[in-house]
Image: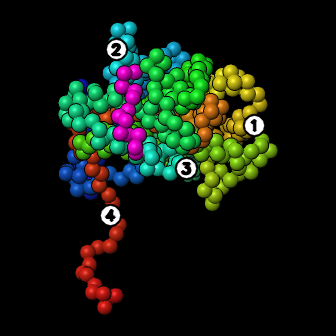
């Protein structure tokens, strides 16, 4: 019984002539919840919430989103402050352990990550089974899943020490695997990590260096990459995080759970939207074609959606999109890219959409995926690498949420039920009678 249960009056449910009391729990901030865990055992009825629009799947202390106000907090810290004042490695520590690290903690954590960035040499063989034109996300699903075959010293998920090792290994190795996926897709040799580089600079080094010449990493681009990682690190119980939690609830190998999260993130309605948004901007091509696409986005009979727009939770501007837009301008300026036609289309599209009744009434605003593609393209990534970068950054969020689930004493295997509308029982019909 939590403190909040004692203070809050229960909800009352009347079913036929029965009255039921359902406990209500208050969070530290945000909506309270009605506990329906015993609804089926007491009433024989399920709740019904396809898409989980009104369902809290867990208690969490990691990330809080206020969709109406456009607020995103990680362990209470606003995303704008973390992106502006912090760095990705300390954000990883915060997400994993709940507090910002002091100097000694940060030094130890960063050294642990840096010294685990190399992957087992055998892992390289997995890449060579793919065609060179394989989508890098397909490679990520396969290779990250394969990690579950490499670390038998950290598969007992009931052992906190082994969970800690697995968590740090994943955070350390995911950039190396992502860079290898990129190198493989462009037919260049893999580049090893360098321990003297920080996390984001090391990633850019592994992606863009070649054995034939040193290519120093631009510190402005490394800072932009680090900030992009912070913006994508965690986001409450989104589809891919819920996938990792559900996979992990059966006690599955953490590397396999993260591979499941990568698979879910790939979808264009989720993390795949950054690739789809850039492809959309390229298809629109010029500002004068925007009205046609706005009309298509509003047409119920047209499956076209404005990619990078709308969000299940944000009914206001995604705070990450604002930081992303600022980063976009910084990167384009640093690279001397003036008048990027895709940026012109994006800025004009945003302006038109935010003044169009359809988008205003449905509270559709740019989300994190709207500007990220332009930025990542300017840094030098092809669009099929955008969701890989999202997965790279989100790995810490998945792992932090996975750890929280495993450590939750009320944790059980996730097993939703259904409203069955299929055939009622009938007897088998022999073939000659069909
Ligand atoms: C991410 O959950 C997270 O936190 C995800 C994420 C994270 O960090 O993990 O934030 C990352 O996935 C961001 C979202 C990226 N996806 C896109 O940008 C794809 C385009 N967006 C849409 O597909 C949509 O907005 C979703 C999937 C993001 C949200 O879908 P919902 O909540 O199920 O909303 P919906 O599809 O029911 O839309 C509500 C209405 C519908 O119209 P009606 O049926 O009410 O008439 O708004 C319309 C939709 O047709 N609508 C859009 C639209 N998004 C919603 N119309 C045109 N263009 C759009 N982009």
The answer to whether the residue labelled 2 contacts the one labelled 1, judged by CB atoms less than 8 Å apart, is: no
| Residue shown at the point (51%, 14%) measured from the top left | 85
Q: Earlier in the sequence, mark 4 or mark 2?
A: 2
Q: Image check: 432 left or right of 355?
A: left
| Residue shown at the point (48%, 18%) measured from the top left | 197
- Residue identified by numbered label 3: 133
Instruction: Select label 4 or label 1 by which is in front.
Output: 1
Residue 361 sits in which quadrant? top right
Q: Position of residue 72 (x, y in %)?
A: 48, 27
Categorize mark 2 by other alpha carbons within 10 Å: few (<14), some (14-19), many (20+): few
- Residue identified by numbered label 1: 341
Q: Magenta span covers which residues?
A: 114-126
Q: Position of residue 84 (x, y in %)?
A: 54, 17
Any magenta on residue 431?
Answer: no
Q: Image check: 413 left or right of 394?
A: left
The C terminus: image quadrant: bottom left
Q: Secondary structure at mark 3?
A: loop
Q: Nearer the viewer, residue 73 or 338?
A: 338
Residue 56 in view (yes/no): no
Q: Which mark is residue 420?
A: 4
Q: Secondary structure at mark 1?
A: helix
Q: Position of residue 428 (x, y in %)?
A: 25, 81
Any magenta on residue 119?
Answer: yes
Separation (CA) of disc 3 from disc 4? 42 Å
Instruction: Select label 2 or label 3 by which is in front.
Output: 3
Q: Earlier in the sequence, mark 2 or mark 1?
A: 2
């Amino acid at each position: 019984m939590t403190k909040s249960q004692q203070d809050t009056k229960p909800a009352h449910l009347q079913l036929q002539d029965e009255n039921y009391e359902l406990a209500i729990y208050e969070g530290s901030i945000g909506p309270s919840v009605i506990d329906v865990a015993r609804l089926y055992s007491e009433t024989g009825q399920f709740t019904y919430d396809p898409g989980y629009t009104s369902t809290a799947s867990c208690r969490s202390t990691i990330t809080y989103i206020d969709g109406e106000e456009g607020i995103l907090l990680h362990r209470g810290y606003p995303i704008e402050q973390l992106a502006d004042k912090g760095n990705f490695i300390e954000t990883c520590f915060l997400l994993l352990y709940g507090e910002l690290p002091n100097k000694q903690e940060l030094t130890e954590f960063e050294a642990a990550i840096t010294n685990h960035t190399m992957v087992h040499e055998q892992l390289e063989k997995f890449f060579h089974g793919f065609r060179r034109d394989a989508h890098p996300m397909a490679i990520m699903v396969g290779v990250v899943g394969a990690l579950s075959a490499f670390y038998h010293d950290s598969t007992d998920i009931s052992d906190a020490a082994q969970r800690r090792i697995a968590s740090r290994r994943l955070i350390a190795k995911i950039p190396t695997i992502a860079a290898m996926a990129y190198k493989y897709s462009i037919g260049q040799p893999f580049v090893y990590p360098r321990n003297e580089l920080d996390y984001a600079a090391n990633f850019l080094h592994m992606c863009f260096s070649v054995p034939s010449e040193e290519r120093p990493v631009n510190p402005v681009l490394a800072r932009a990459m680090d900030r992009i990682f912070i913006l994508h690190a965690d986001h409450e119980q989104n589809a891919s995080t819920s996938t990792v939690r559900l996979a992990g609830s059966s006690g599955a190998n953490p590397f396999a759970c993260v591979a499941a999260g990568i698979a879910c993130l790939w979808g264009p309605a989720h993390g795949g939207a950054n690739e789809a948004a850039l492809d959309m901007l390229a298809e629109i091509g010029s500002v004068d074609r925007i009205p046609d696409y706005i009309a298509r986005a509003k047409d119920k009979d047209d499956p076209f959606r404005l990619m990078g727009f709308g969000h299940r939770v944000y009914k206001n501007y995604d705070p990450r999109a604002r930081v992303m837009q600022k980063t976009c301008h910084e990167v384009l300026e640093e690279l001397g890219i003036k008048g990027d036609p895709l940026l012109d289309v994006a800025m004009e599209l945003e302006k038109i959409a935010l003044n169009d009744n359809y988008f205003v009434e449905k509270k559709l605003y740019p989300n994190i995926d709207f500007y990220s593609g332009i930025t990542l393209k300017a840094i030098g990534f092809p669009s099929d690498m955008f969701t890989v970068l999202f997965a790279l950054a989100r790995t810490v969020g998945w792992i932090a949420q996975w750890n929280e689930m495993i450590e939750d004493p009320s944790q059980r295997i996730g097993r939703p039920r259904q409203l069955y509308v299929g055939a009622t029982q009938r007897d088998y019909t022999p073939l000659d009678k069909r």
